[in-house]
Amino acid sequence: MSLDTAGYIVAGAAAEIADGAYAVVEAGEHSVLVANLDGEFFAVENRCSHVSSPLDGGRVRRGRIACPLHGAVYDLRTGASLAGTLAPRGLRTFATRVKDGMVWVAIQPSFLGAV
Ligand code: FES
C-alpha cells in the first residue's frame, strides 16, 4: 500500500474503474468502495449499516448502490441512506482525488455516516 503524506492511498488506475463501476480497496482500517460516477470518483465504506454486510456485489444505478443482502440503498456521492428504517444510518465517506491517472482515497473518513 502506497500512502502519501496527506494520508491518501492509491485505489487504482482511473481508466480501470469504468463509469458506473467501482473498486474495493483497503484504506487503513477500512474496506472502501470507490465508484466512478460520470467520471468523478466517490468513496464510501464497504459495509452496509443494516447488519454490516459488505456492499460490494451490489448494483449501482443512478449514483446509488443497493446492498446485495437485503436491498438497502445508499447515495454514493454523500453516503446517505435512502433505505428508511431498514438502514437509518448513512455510510462513512472518504475523500478522493485523481493524480497522474491514478485514483487516491483518504484512509480516514471525512463523514461519519451519522445521517
Ligand atoms: S445487510 Fe444491507 S440491507 Fe441488510
Image (cartoon, grey):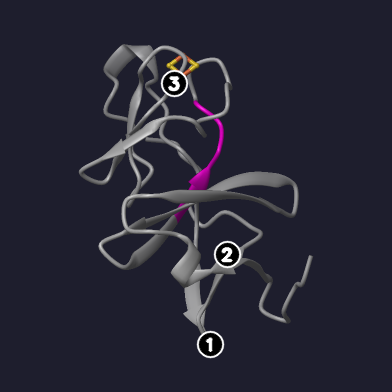
Rendered position, 49 above or below 43:
above
Secondary element at image label 2: strand
Disc ID at residue 68: 3
Q: CA distance from mark 2 to mark 1?
A: 14 Å
Real-space Cα distance between discs 2 and 3? 24 Å
Read off the residue under disc 2.
105
First in residue order: circle 3 vs circle 1: 3
Q: Which residues are magenta?
A: 43-48
Q: In the rendered image, which quarter is residue 8 located in?
A: bottom right
Amino acid type at circle 1 is Asp
Q: Position of residue 3 (x, y in %)?
A: 75, 72
21 vs 3, nearest the viewer: 21
Residue labelled with disc 1: 100
Question: What is the secondary structure assignment of the residue under circle 1?
Answer: loop
Q: Amino acid at mark 3?
A: Pro
Q: Nearer the viewer, residue 73 or 13?
A: 13
